[in-house]
Amino acid sequence: MDKTQEKLEEETEKWLEKLNERIEKRDESVEQMENVLAYRDDTSHFLEENDYIRAWESVIYAWGILETLERLGRFN
């Protein structure tokens, strides 16, 4: 594994952990949360496959959806 792949893996795992912590505080029944959870699960899958680019993309998509839902006030 080269240094770029190592950095991608580290960053993806860091943001996946933060995402999981943030999700714990949210109502999973909110519409569109299924997409956040699906992208989170995809992230883990791609990490297992050593596909670090797709893993990074998936965690970023999950964050984008979650933050959009938060900004729209979808959570109490």
Image (tube, rainbow, N blue to C red):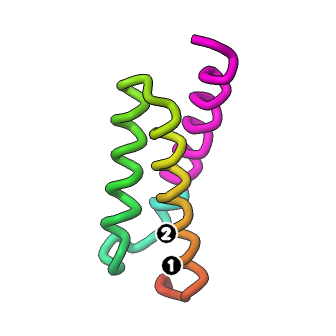
Q: Residue at x 49, y 66 (%)?
A: 25
The span from disc 2 to disc 1 (Cα, nearest Å) is 6 Å
- 23 displayed left or right of 4: left
Q: Residues within 10 Å of mark 2 (few under 14, many from 20)?
A: some
In which quadrant will I find the N terminus?
Answer: top right
Judge whether residue 13 is colored magenta.
Answer: yes
Q: Which amino acid type is marked by label 2?
A: Ile
The magenta region covers 1-21
Q: Which amino acid type is marked by label 1?
A: Leu
User: What label does residue 65 carry, if any?
Assistant: 2
User: What label does residue 69 carry, if any?
Assistant: 1
Disc 1 is placed on an element classified as helix
Quadrant assignment, res 67: bottom right
Where residue 27 sits in the image (x, y, percent)? 39, 74
Does residue 13 sit above or below 61 in this rendering?
above
Q: Residue at x 34, y 35 (%)?
A: 45
Disc 2 is placed on an element classified as helix
Where residue 71 sits in the image (x, y, percent)? 60, 82
Does residue 44 sit above or below 3 in this rendering?
below
Q: Residue furthest top?
A: 1
Q: Label 1 near label 2: C-beta < 8 Å?
A: yes
